[in-house]
Image (cartoon, rainbow, N blue to C red):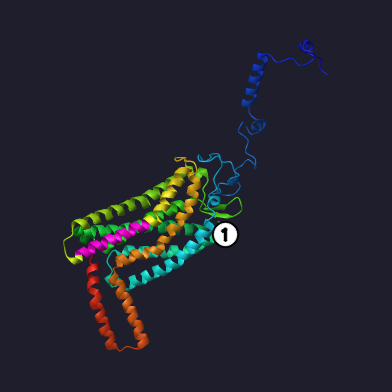
Amino acid sequence: MRQPDLQEVHHGGKPRPASVVEQARALLWRKAQMSQPDLQEVHHGGKPRPASVVEQPMWQNGTHPSWEISPSVKTSRPSSNSSAPLQCVAEAEFQHLLLPITYSTVCVLSLASNGVALWSCWASRARAPPVMIFIYNLIAIDLLFALSLPLQAVYHVRNNDWPFGENLCKATNALFLANMFSCTLFLACICLERYLAVIHPVRYLRLRWPLCRVLLSLAIWTVIGIGLLTIFSRSSVTSQFPNGNTACMENFPAHVWSGCLAGMVLASSALGFFVPFLTIVICSVVIAQRIVHLSHGSAQASSLRRHSLCTLLMVTTLLTLCFLPFHVIYTLHTLGRIGVLSSPGLLQFTCSAQRATMALASINSALDPLVYYFNMEPAHWKLSCCRTILQHLKCSHGASPTEEVHQKHDLEGEILPKARFQSNI
């Protein structure tokens, strides 16, 4: 038992109050203790001790960082929009109903409409204009994209749980991106063809060689292929959600957004959509002005100008309805993720809007045949359909060979002159 201090005796046996000097000494001692290394740091050579399992972020427990930010995990770089990390899946529960229905419907319609377009292109290949090379590319990518939609529908029906493995996850998302960017670029090429045919007809005639279209198509696919390889060859695209579901190419963590991902998203949207889209809009405006100023001319020339304007307006409408919302929302989401935009509630809005714009983007593959119709020329469609009808009539009624020849000549005499004129445009 300690002896009472002399000053305690004078204070009735109670501890004396600390003086100002002693309080200052105690404050300095506490600061010195805080600046000294932890005991476990000494055992680790002066380096900060490694975090325990509880302290480690959840995405470090697997072989690859989880691409989902769980609300229960404290990230080192919190979002500027919210003090708690954001989970996009929880922000868009409606996707589990909207996307499966949309993808299933688009798959059926796209396979049917693009199948008819492919058949019509093949039936009229002898009279096909050079622009059909771009349309063949569009048909091919639309059909491949439609075949991947059932897998995406299953993923969202299962509450964002991917059961098909890493490679199919990469393949389906690669087809989604390839469809979106290739459609935009090939539609821009079609619009440039119309622009040259109306505004610079002499220059257009010099560039009518199909080889030019083939080389341009190869260049487009090369650029898209390099971009896809850059994205999908870097690392795995599947990971585990906190609830145990397998994520497929969604919800990147903060350190990935602040790295190369944001730059790739912004660059691909700018070069793969916004620049071609502005090109199409400018071409449409210029052709519309030319049509207004050139009211004179032959009926065929006026028909050409109206036909070109209708094609441009159709393409502009499709891109505006299907792809423009996706790229605008995803650009805003990217800027919000990296902290450039810090508006309250921005990320919550973009997380939900992304799923709706994904559904709109998929609809494009079912609507593209409208563009094929305007560029294949109605006469080609009529001729192909009428020939098929004649073949069915032959099988069902047993028409004589003489009657078939007369019917064929009447059909070609009515339709082919217009088709030949439009094919030379």
Q: Quadrant of residue 403?
A: bottom left
Residue 166 horizontal/vertical position (percent): 53, 57
Given residues 43 and 174, the one toward you in this image is 174
Give above or below for 188 relative to 391. Answer: above
The answer to whether residue 150 is seen in the rendering is yes
Residue at screen point 47% across, 65% down: 105
Residue 257 horizontal/vertical position (percent): 48, 44
Range of the magenta residues?
A: 301-319
Q: Residues within 10 Å of mark 1 (few under 14, many from 20)?
A: few
Residue at screen point 31% across, 54% down: 280
Residue 251 horizontal/vertical position (percent): 52, 49
Q: Quadrant of the N terminus?
A: top right
Residue 304 horizontal/vertical position (percent): 23, 64
Given residues 244 and 85, the one toward you in this image is 85
Q: Is residue 303 left or right of residue 99?
A: left
Q: Quadrant of residue 418?
A: bottom left
* Residue ID for mark 1: 158
Q: Amino acid at mark 1?
A: Arg
Give above or below for 142 relative to 5. Answer: below
Q: Quadrant of the C terminus?
A: bottom left
Q: Is residue 59 left or right of residue 421?
A: right
Q: Is residue 274 left or right of residue 93?
A: left
Q: Is residue 233 left or right of residue 47?
A: left
Secondary element type, mark 1: loop
